[in-house]
Amino acid sequence: MTMTLPDLHRPHSPLARPILRVLVWLILIVFMAPLGAWGQEGVNVNLSQGPPVVPYQKLFFYSGSNLTYICMTTSPGRQTSTFTISSATSATPAVFTSTSHGFFVTGPGALGRPKVTISGAPTAWAAINGTWILSAVDANTFQLLSPTTGTAFDGVGIAAWSGTATVTTNAPRTTLNIWAIQRLTYDGFSNLITLTWALGPQGLTSSLCTDPTAATIEYR
């Protein structure tokens, strides 16, 4: 007795077409899957306890015990900004003044210690030209810490400040239109009832974080 097997190489074979379809689909899956991954921006889920792909700085504002506003932006920021030092104290440590410098302060100590670069300081204060870690004292003043030792700059014995100096940084400042602001509202029993976002002049990530409670901010 002779058994004839189907010829898979012939187009009219009843098994050839299904097998070819399976092979084609397998090839598409193998080659198209990486393309889908490449088309994504960053990683949607952080599967480890390591740092996020895109780090964010977040500022939290409370009313009593309720969290009411969150400002967030990428850190370091995507843009470089400058501001001016107008005065300094000849003391230990030296305290520098720049009105509304934009680095968030929460009472004793500042949130974060951003890296800054100073240029154009008066001759007597030329030693501050260079890169420092800024430690905010309040909304208008700060100290400069050595990036290697953490020691604050000592102004004792230096002549009185005269003139200005320029501070450059890519750290996020509350006075820049780079923030997304989330507003949280509660009912009379402190139950969270809504989450809305501030609409800045150029979208959801273009607000100032100087006063998220301002009545002029539109939330959606």
Image (cartoon, rainbow, N blue to C red):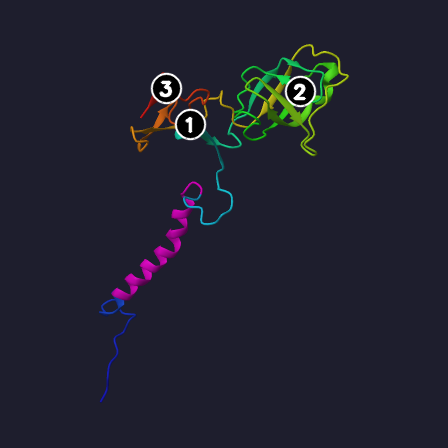
Taking the spot 75% from the left edge, 13% from the top edge, the residue there is 159
Can you identify the residue that label 3 sits on? 217
Residue 119, labelled with which disc? 2
Quarter of the image with the N terminus in it: bottom left
- Mark 1 surroundings within 10 Å by alpha-carbon count, few (fewer than 14), some (14 through 19), many (20 or more): few
Discs 1, 2 touching: Cβ within 8 Å: no
Left/right of residue 172 with respect to residue 94 in the rendered view? left
Label 1, secondary structure: give it.
strand
In this rendered view, identify the residue nearer to me: 185 or 115: 185
Q: Residue 41's spot in the image, x, y percent? A: 42, 40
Prevailing secondary structure of the magenta residues: helix
Work out whether residue 49 or residue 136 is closer to the camera in this orientation and state it.
Answer: 136
Give the residue at x 61% y 26%: 135
Q: Is residue 128 left or right of residue 185?
A: right
Mark 2, secondary structure of its residue: strand
Q: Quadrant of residue 118?
A: top right
Q: Of callouts 3 and 2, which one flags the residue occurring earlier in the amino acid sequence?
A: 2
Q: Amino acid at mark 1?
A: Tyr
Q: CA distance from mark 3 to mark 2?
A: 36 Å
Please tell me which residue is depicted at 65% across the width and 19% down the height of the picture.
95
Q: Give the farthest residue toward the right.
A: 157
Image coords of residue 7 (percent x, y) = 27, 74
Q: Earlier in the sequence, mark 1 or mark 2?
A: 1
74 is within the stretch colored magenta: no
User: Quick one: 37 or 13, which is closer to the camera?
Assistant: 37
Residue annotated with mark 1: 62
Q: Nearer the viewer, mark 3 or mark 2?
A: 3
Question: Is residue 161 depicted above or below 212 in this figure?
Answer: above
Q: Which mark is residue 83?
A: none
Q: Which residues are magenta?
A: 18-42
